[in-house]
Every structure is written in structure tokens, then in C-alpha cells.
Image (cartoon, grey):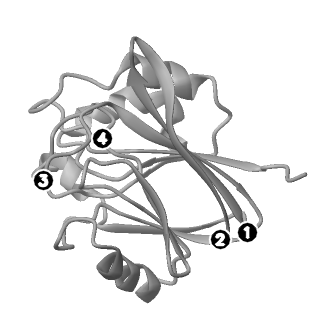
Amino acid sequence: MVIFLGTLIAWGDSHIPYRADKIPDEFIKFIKNIDLDKLICTGDLVRIDVLKTFEWISNKLVIVRGNMDEGDAERHPLFQSFRYEGLNFLVYHGHRVYPRGDPEKLYKISKKRGAEVLITGHTHTPTIRKFRDLLIINPGSICGVWGGAGGYGRPTWGLINVSERRVKVKIYEIAGGGIVLHDEADFEL
């Protein structure tokens, strides 16, 4: 039996205030009930005020800049790397990859930075996939907003549990007035 030691939550592409008004209350309640180690934002906050929602856990935030971020939200780096539970993680919005979400190009960017797990955004479509020896996680759009190439259309985020070289990913969505599991996968890296 594997005991998962670490918990990460990934979200992004809120596009507040242009495409959505606020972070969904259901998501806030969800993260308040999780003992999380890091809250990872894949970019496109758009406005820095969005982070006021997370002041109570600001010391756990990992944020990258997206292509739509403006003003103070542009101060975040394009890439954030960290080592967590024995794995090398990279966070990158993904807006310099064409076509959007192309796994080959994301792979090259990630491997250049030594990553084993990439948490990315930009497509607004929740995705969990292993491409060669890279785990690619896209939590989708936390507000369920449209993107330049469409998107999924419902608010989604990722819950990532890590134990040594094993990663369990669950994508949740808000649907039917509640939180439901959208997808899940378990990987040995």
C-alpha cells in the first residue's frame, strides 16, 4: 500500500475580470478542507487582486505568468521549478507553444529544465497524460472560461498526490451544483 505524503493543488486561467467575476466558492471550500503543501497557479490570473482570495495561504503559492496577465500580475516568472517528494516539477503557462498544448514542444521545454512533471495551462482543457518520460498535467480553467482555442467550459482544477516516484492526479470540476471527479490517473515515474 502506498501512502501519499504530499498534496499539491493546481489551477489557472481564471481570466478575472474580463471573462469571469471571481474564483468559484466551491474551489475555495475545497482547498480549505485539504492539507496542501503547495497551491500552484498556471498563469492568466489577469489581475493581481485575484491573489487576495488566497492571502491565508500565500506562503504556499507557486505562480507563473500567463500571456494575458497585466500590471503587477506580469511580475511572476515564466517558469517555476521545484523539487518535491523526490521529483522535479516545472510550472509553465504554455503560451509560447504552438499548436497549443503540443506535447512534443512541451516535452522539449520541460526536459531542457530537467523536469519529470510539467504543470501547464493555456488550453483551458483539463488534461492528464504521460508523454515519453514526462507527466503533463493541465488543470484547465478554474472559472471554466473560454480560451483562444476553445476549452472545456466548466471550472476545473487538479489535485496531485505524490509519494516518492508515484503520482496520483485527480481533476475535479464544478457541475450539477457540486464538485465531481472529472478524471484521474496514477503514474509511476
Mark-to-mark CA distance, 2 and 1: 7 Å
Mark-to-mark CA distance, 2 and 3: 31 Å
CB-based contact (under 8 Å), mark 4 and mark 1? no
CB-based contact (under 8 Å), mark 2 and mark 4? no
Front-lying residue, 182 or 100 = 182
Tag 4, which secondary structure? loop
Q: Earlier in the sequence, mark 2 or mark 3?
A: 2
Say which residue label 1 marks. 165
CB-based contact (under 8 Å), mark 2 and mark 1? yes
Res. 38 visible in picture: no
Q: Which amino acid type is shown beneath numbered disc 1?
A: Arg
Image vertical order of residue 95 relative to residue 146, above or below: below
As drawn, the label of residue 141 is 4
In this view, the mark in front (3 or 1)? 3
- Mark 2 crowd level (few <14, some 14–19, many ≥20, 10 Å Cα): some
Q: Which amino acid type is shown beneath numbered disc 4?
A: Ser
In this view, the mark in front (2 or 3)? 3
Say which residue label 3 marks. 149
Give the percent coordinates (x, y) of residue 116.
Answer: 56, 75
Say which residue appears at 51% left-offset and 84% top-offset. Answer: 114
Mark-to-mark CA distance, 4 and 1: 27 Å
Q: Which amino acid type is shown beneath numbered disc 2?
A: Leu
Residue at the outermost top position = 177
Q: Which amino acid type is shown beneath numbered disc 3?
A: Ala
Say which residue appears at 15% left-offset and 40% top-offset. Answer: 146
Q: Quadrant of residue 112?
A: bottom left
In this view, the mark in front (2 or 1)? 1
CB-based contact (under 8 Å), mark 2 and mark 3? no
Say which residue label 2 marks. 87
Say which residue appears at 24% left-offset and 54% top-offset. Answer: 123
Front-lying residue, 79 or 166 = 166
